[in-house]
Amino acid sequence: MEQEDEAAFRAKYLGPPVNQLSTFSAAKKKRRTGATQFNFDWDPTEDTSRPHDPLYSNRHPEISNFRLGEMSENDVRQEAEALRRDDPHFGDDRARRLLERYKEIREAAAKKTKKLGKHWSEKSLEEMQQRDWRIFKENFGISTKGGSIPNPMRNWQESNLPQQFLDIIYQVGYDEPTPIQKAAIPIALQSRDLIGVAVTGSGKTAAFLLPLLVYISRLPPLTESNKNDGPYALILAPTRELAQQIESEAKKFATPLGFNVVSIVGGHTQTEQLSALEKGAEIIVATPGRLVDYIESRFLVFSQCCYVIMDEADRMIDQGFEEPLTKILEAMPVDNEKPDTEEAEDPQAMSRYLGLTHRFRQTMMYTATMPPAVEKIATKYLRRPARVNIGNLGEAVDTVEQRVEFIAGEEKRKRRLQEILNSGHFKPPIIVFVNIKRNCDAVARDIKQMGYNAVTLHGSKTQDQREAALASLRNGDTHILVATDLAGRGIDVSDVSLVVNFNMASSIESYTHRIGRTGRAGKSGVAITFLGTEDADVLYDLKQIISKSSISKVPEELRRHEAAQNRPNKGPRKIEQ
């Protein structure tokens, strides 16, 4: 039954079986195929295409501009001769065009090579390309962030500073701008708000002073009618020493221009400072705590203040000045705040508000680190600021050679300190840092017994004692300063050849600021740190910062130390100052 069903299916769907043989022979198939072949109506001898004509079959290939630029002159001349030989009709013309193309390509390549091959220092400002600016910024460790940021200046002549300012700069002895000055001054001259992140000793004081003085030089002079409206500019610093240093530096430029600079810091009588303010001051340099006292006592107003600079903002936060800093910024006029729009990044738009009647306030912040509290202040009071970073955040400058030695015990450290001082490798002035203020006098006595003059600087000293100690160090009467971290920032002593950390700092930030007392203004310096078991919490960060220095080497004992392998979770130790 199944076979019958299968046969029925086959018959239905495949048709009946065919048993006869095919009668379609190969000869018939050939004749049928040939019957449909296309045939020309003319004889093959009449074909005029002549596929084997040498003019077409032996045509000389065209050479691309890319290949032509890679060929030597001799190869090109050989190609030209081949064109003349193989193409009797047009060979001469094609050879001439080939040689002309080669000449144009080579001239263009030579011009481009000459333009790109010159170092940026050999080029004029007009010749500088984006590639040159990128190399320039890499050479000086400059990185910027923000819209409409101008290129850095390569030298003072390209700074767009008035000639009168340039004359003073050269008289003061600033022969070459530092990286922060190269990057920050062109930005500040465009009335931009600015955040400058640079380590201590990088020359940032002049970076904000020069644009400030240019700004206020455009304003009407202070007279009896407007001097009581307050200063044109305010500079805030975390310590009285730094404020006085800024005041001294500012007077070098301001006095020849006819501007008055007054400092408001602790340690001086209120009568003395008020007397200076009554004469009128275009620029005030102050510490936050003392300035808030003057504001709350209504001794000072800021009705016409249009320029605010916060120097070492992170240090101000560390010292608990966040609230006073906020009070000071809130005391500024509200009618001269910049708009928080793209207009704040437009130098042409900002230039329209530099007139005598209405002007926007320009705010700048300089810091070595950017903790959240500093970011918070910058976000609230700065408008679309340009950011300038010099080097890597939190790293020491590359002009300081960092050395570390594991020495346990005070007596061994004193003997090692004497060996270093007696080596003759380091000339005064020298700074020795300790962690506890009561150790300052003890270490200073030991140094005097070694035959060197020494003075101390710590939190228990009066202002007069501090100034006397620094003056003796600067004029050469004293060889060595023994200090706590109070002197880690804001102390400007020129040509310090050596910093000795008799005790390691409690944090890597304090360590960075300590060793920043040497290797300043492009000069080299050495920092030697004594380490012990009490320093385990900072060994990891110390190893990292030394390893990033191009002139320092991590010793094997520190490299292999167990505490230097991983970052600790503990906070910094509290150190008495």
Image (cartoon, helix red, strand yellow):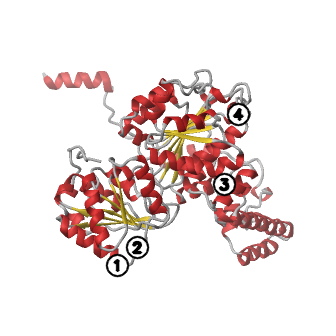
Disc marking residue 426? 2
Q: How far is the residue under mark 1 from the one under mark 3?
A: 50 Å
| 156 on left or right of 480 | right
Q: Is residue 412 visible?
A: yes
Mark 1 near mark 4, Cβ–Cβ under 8 Å? no
Disc marking residue 423? 1
Query: x%, y% of residue 448?
Result: 31, 69
Q: Which callout, 1 or 3, points at the residue further toward the start of the chain?
A: 3
Q: How far is the residue under mark 2 from the one under mark 1?
A: 8 Å
Query: x%, y% of residue 403?
Result: 32, 67
Tag 2: Cα neighbours inside 10 Å, few (<14), some, or many (≥20)? Answer: some
Residue drawn at (46%, 29%) of the image? 292
Amino acid residing under circle 3: Gln
Disc marking residue 129? 3
Q: For the residues carrying marks 2 and 3, which lies nearer the camera in this image?
A: 2
Disc marking residue 500? none
Q: Considering depth in this image, is 223 or 397 the residue closer to the camera?
A: 223
Q: For the residues carrying marks 2 and 4, which lies nearer the camera in this image?
A: 4
Disc marking residue 222? 4
Mark 2 near mark 1, Cβ–Cβ under 8 Å? yes
Residue drawn at (55%, 51%) of the image? 180
Q: Is residue 504 above or below residue 292?
A: below
Q: Which callout, 3 or 4, points at the residue further toward the start of the chain?
A: 3
